Image (cartoon, grey):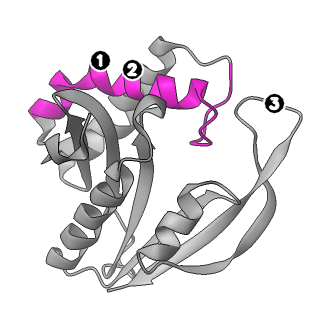
Amino acid sequence: MSSANLELTLLPADAAAACLPELANLLHACVQGGASVSFVLPYSLADAAAFWRAKVLPGVESGALKLWVARLDGRLAGSVQLDTDTPPNQPHRAEVRKLLVHPDLRRRGIARRLMVEVDGMAARLGRSLITLDTRTGDSAEPLYASLGYQTVGVIPGFARDPIDAAKVDGTTIMYKQL
């Protein structure tokens, strides 16, 4: 598959709800593949669907959360969220959440394209600061740096490893000023 056939879509609430089974499959595959995105094994497809239904769809419905999907040759290949539900003293800030690319479709520029969309939307919404966190040493860390995100620091032992519950991983906190 060529990344030339990549289509990015900002989903309105009704399309996000209709896409829930595909989004659940994507999240499930990522967690099964070891992605550190808040969940640990065992992690079922039902768990993944419940996450999208309870934690993402309400934000998309309210307009506080922007959700993109990436389709490669029609197949759901990735997604990312931009959370603009900030406190009253932070109307200038947004947070990147859950950048996901299916394990079978990585290294094709999908994550980069999704992040470019996030940055553009944040700017259009008048947000001048974007924050995110990522597992320290993960492949996403250099991607974010290449897109202009700066490292604030590392919190050691922040989260349980998704595969090995006895291991804890650090998280790297990053930001980008627009």
Q: Marks 3/2: CA distance?
A: 21 Å
Residue assigned mark 2 = 25
Reading the chain from its start, which is encountered first: label 3 or label 2? 2
Q: Marks 1/2: CA distance?
A: 6 Å
Q: Secondary structure at mark 3?
A: loop
**Does the magenta-highlighted stretch encompass residue 29?**
yes
Q: Position of residue 145 (x, y in %)?
A: 51, 75
**Does the magenta-highlighted stretch encompass residue 82?**
no
Q: Position of residue 57 (x, y in %)?
A: 27, 36
Q: Amino acid at mark 3?
A: Asp
Q: Decide: is 80 above or below 117.
A: above
Q: Which residue lies most toward the right here?
A: 166
Q: Residue at x 36, y 47 (%)?
A: 108
Q: Which mark is residue 21?
A: 1
Q: Secondary structure at mark 2?
A: helix
Q: Residue at x 19, y 68 (%)?
A: 121
Q: Amino acid at mark 2?
A: Asn
Q: Residue at x 66, y 66 (%)?
A: 172
How dense is the environment of label 1, judged by Cα within 10 Å: few (below 14), some, or many (20 and up)? some
- Marks 1 and 2 close (CB-CB < 8 Å): yes
Residue assigned mark 3 = 164
Q: Amino acid at mark 1?
A: Pro
Q: Secondary structure at mark 1?
A: helix
Q: Position of residue 166 (x, y in %)?
A: 89, 34
How dense is the environment of label 3, judged by Cα within 10 Å: few (below 14), some, or many (20 and up)? few
